[in-house]
Image: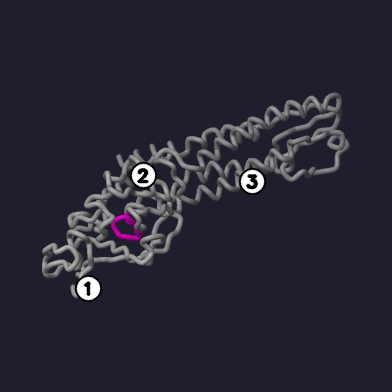
Amino acid sequence: MQCPKCGQANKPNAAFCANCGTRRQSAPQAASTKSFSGASSGSSANKTMIVQSVPGMVNTNASEVLIGRASNCDIVINDGGVSSKHAKIFVDNEEVFIEDLRSMNGTYVDGRKVTGKVKITAFSKINIGSYPLNLTHPAIANMINNYGIASFSDSGVLSLKINQTWVGKIFYFVMVILFFFPWIIIKGGTESISLSALDFAFNKSPEKNSLLSKIDYGPLNTLFLVIFILLIVGLIMNFLKLRISNKLNWTNILSLVIFIVTVIYMYVVSSIDSAVGGFGSLAHTFSAYMFIFICFISMFEGLIEFYISEKRNY
């Protein structure tokens, strides 16, 4: 059948022109073809994007998906502004990337033109030329579900993925528990009192004591409160899959922040100790040193999980 727009000869059952991408109104769409439509803004506001899977060629377990106007692409976008082989989405080092294949009109991720390869997630907004790519397409969604931080349900609903590893959860749970144990022992004459990190965080004393009334905590309360809030945030983050790479996640970065803040706390305590002066002395307990040690180890939790996983696969 001849295309009324460009005159290209097409197969009788073709739904689109292979040359210009014009949809043939009289031709029914193949049953095995899956389409997504959506209007875009600007000069193409009245146009429709048709994303068509080539019948018999879609592999939902593929690690690479080719996108373009050519009929041999995994995902065919029938529009003149899309190059024959426009871009590809692929898996590298257990992460999902998109790469522009020297297309005429470019590929954009979150409004920025792709040069080289760019990491994408389920939250990315991808434009192939001037048209938005539907990430719920089975071939793309499968890669994102397997390697991304979020997944699509069968109905296309986006949700964060649950982290099923346990090392990070244990580290943060132990650190939260250590906050309830005594961190500091203050001695003055015949008086002695121990304070937990939680006591400092919420500026409270376990008992009325004349020794405590003579001590200025200074910035120690705020510092402990910041650490405690970061611990709770980190514990919640450990239940979500927030991976940066296969050996690093965002919780590991948070552990680094907590470690630095805790080291700063050690320096602040030295000034507090001098403020105590003749009233007594201040010393850390085993809980404080254990907290710093576990926090340091938790910075490498992603790496530990990676090697545990590798050992299981082996």
- Observer-side mark, 2 or 1, equals 1
Q: Pointer 3: what residue?
A: 229
- Observer-side mark, 1 or 3, equals 1
Q: Look at label 1 and name its amino acid.
A: Gln
Mark sitting on residue 37: none
Q: Is residue 272 above or below residue 116?
A: above
Q: Look at label 3 and name its amino acid.
A: Ile
Mark-to-mark CA distance, 1 and 3: 60 Å
Residue drawn where x is 26% and y is 66% of the image: 34
Residues at discs 1 and 3 in contact (Cβ within 8 Å): no
Q: Is residue 174 left or right of residue 214?
A: left
**Within the magenta stretch, is there residue 136?**
yes
Q: Is residue 3 above or below residue 204?
A: below
For residue 196, which quarter of the picture?
Answer: top right
Magenta-colored span: 133-142
Q: Pointer 1: what residue?
A: 25
Q: Look at label 2 and name its amino acid.
A: Val
Q: Is residue 100 left or right of residue 209?
A: left
Residue 139 locus on image (x, y percent): 28, 56
For residue 57, which quarter of the picture?
Answer: bottom left
Q: Is residue 173 left or right of residue 183?
A: left
In this view, the residue in front, 233 or 291, is 233
Mark-to-mark CA distance, 2 and 1: 34 Å
Disc 2 packing (10 Å; few <14; some 14–19; many ≥20): many
Q: Pointer 2: what residue?
A: 114
